[in-house]
Image (cartoon, grey):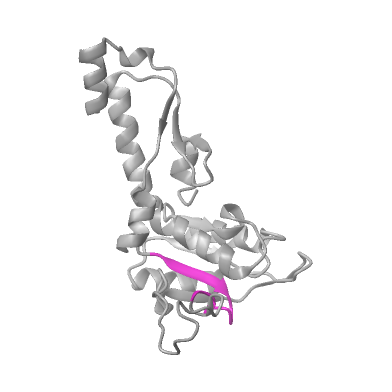
Amino acid sequence: MTALEILQARDGLDPAEISYFTHGTTVGVNTVIQRNGHDIALFTTRNFEDVLEVARLKIPQIHNLYSVRPAPLISRDRVFGIDERMQATGDVLVAPREADVAAALEAALAAGCRGIVLSFLHSYRNPQNELAVKAMIEKLAPGLPVVSSAETWPIIREFERTITAVISGYVQPRVAHYLDRFETVLRDKGVTCPLLITKTNGGVMGIDQARANACR
C-alpha cells in the first residue's frame, strides 16, 4: 500500500493503469515454522492413524539414536480412523458409513478442532471414499473446512500426500485471511487488474486459487 502511494505521488502512476500485479508472500511458510496454524483433525483409513508419526522413519541425525524429529502438525490424539478401504487398483473394498464418520467428527469437534483433513489409503487412485466422507462432513457440520488429500495432492506414497494435505489445512485459514486483506487494500486503491500470487515452483496462480490451495 505504501509503495502504491509513493508511485502515485512521485511518478504520477494511477493504480487503475496497472495491468499486471504479482505478489509473493511467506505467510504460509511462517505459519508452519511458528506453529500457529489452524486447529485441525486428520481422518485416515482405520489402522493407519500413525501415518504422521511413522513418516519415512528418517531421523535428523542418522548416527544419533537419541535424535528427535519435530512433532507432527497434528497430534496423535487428533487423528481418527475411518472404517473404509480402497484397493491399490482403485476398487472400493469398504465404503465409509455416515455413522462412523459422525462419531469421528463428534470426537474431533470435542477436541477443539476447527477443520478436518482427509487422507485415505490409495485415494490418489480413486478419490471416491474421500469425497463421500467430505460430503458427509459438509452435511453433518455445514461450513466446517474440509481438505481432501485426493483433491490437494493426488500422488502415490501415503505420507507425502498426507503431510501435503495437512499443511494445506493447517495454513489455509491464515493464508486466506491475509489474501482477503491484500485484495481489499488493492481494490480500495483502484487496482483493477487480476491479482497473481507466486507459487513455490516458481510459477504464479490467481488469488482465488491461492486461497483454495494454500499449500501451493
41 within the magenta span: yes
Residue drawn at (45%, 76%) of the image: 60
Residue drawn at (40%, 82%) of the image: 68
Residue drawn at (33%, 54%) of the image: 30
User: What x and y, as percent, mark residue 210?
Assistant: 46, 42
Q: Residue furthest top?
A: 12
The N terminus: image quadrant: top left
User: What x and y, as percent, mark residue 97?
Assistant: 61, 70
Q: Residue furthest bottom?
A: 65
The picture quadrant where one finds residue 115 is bottom left
For residue 216, say whether it is visible.
yes
Residue 60 vertical position relative to residue 22 in the rendered view, above or below? below
Pick the front one: 200 or 180: 200
The picture quadrant where one finds residue 19 is top left
User: What x and y, as percent, mark residue 190?
Assistant: 31, 18
Q: Which residues are magenta?
A: 40-52
